[in-house]
Image (cartoon, rainbow, N blue to C red):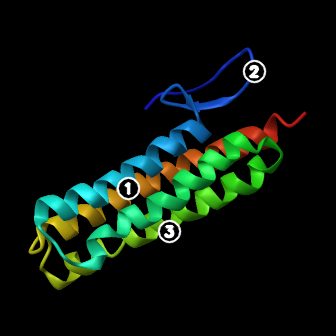
Amino acid sequence: MEENTNQNNNEFKTFGMPIEKFSLLYGSFLIFWGLIVSLISGSSSFTSYIPSFFGIPILLFSYLSLKIHSKKKLFMHMVVLFGLIVFIGGLDLLRSVFNGNLFVNVWADLSKLMMLLTGLFFTYQCVKSFIHARKNKQ
């Protein structure tokens, strides 16, 4: 995990990227994950595309935050909201744990685990970015 601030513009970065660009990558990752897992598993279930459905608004609002700078704050708050929803969706993995049927459906539980971990990390990074922005408000 590389987090730093660029001394030139004092911008919060995750893996060397501004949070908006990191969000673009995360949204793209979620879209491709849902598509690939559905393809590999041969699933015809609507639910196998859930990561993709959450990746689309993350990608869209991240893109808009880069293009419409005056609305960046609004769009990035929408991005973090969807990131939080991804994390909450991943918590459904706990149901499998408590029911004793963890990884009975490997692809579904793997997707839930991915959503849980990446959603938590992504939301955490967004919150840190917001805190950084507030502290460095000019």
Please give left or right for residue 33 compared with residue 89 in the image: left
Q: In the image, which disc is placed on residue 9? A: 2
Instruction: Tell me the residue that label 1 is attached to.
Output: 31
Assess disc 3: are there few (<14), some (14-19) or many (≥20) residues with their C-alpha within 10 Å of its C-alpha. some
Q: Residue furthest right?
A: 138
Q: Quadrant of residue 39?
A: bottom left
Q: Position of residue 115 (x, y in %)?
A: 36, 60
* Residue 83 in view in this figure: no
Q: Could you tell me how many numbered marks the image carries?
A: 3
Assess disc 2: are there few (<14), some (14-19) or many (≥20) residues with their C-alpha within 10 Å of its C-alpha. few
Query: Going from the N terminus, do you reach mark 3 or mark 1 first?
Result: 1
Question: In the rendered view of the protein, which quadrant contains the N terminus?
Answer: top left
Between marks 1 and 2 in the image, the one whose residue lies nearer the viewer: 1
Between marks 3 and 1 in the image, the one whose residue lies nearer the viewer: 1
Instruction: Tell me the residue that label 3 is attached to.
Output: 85
Query: Going from the N terminus, do you reach mark 3 or mark 2 first?
Result: 2
Query: In terms of secondary structure, where does tag 2 sit?
Result: loop
Q: Residue furthest bottom?
A: 99
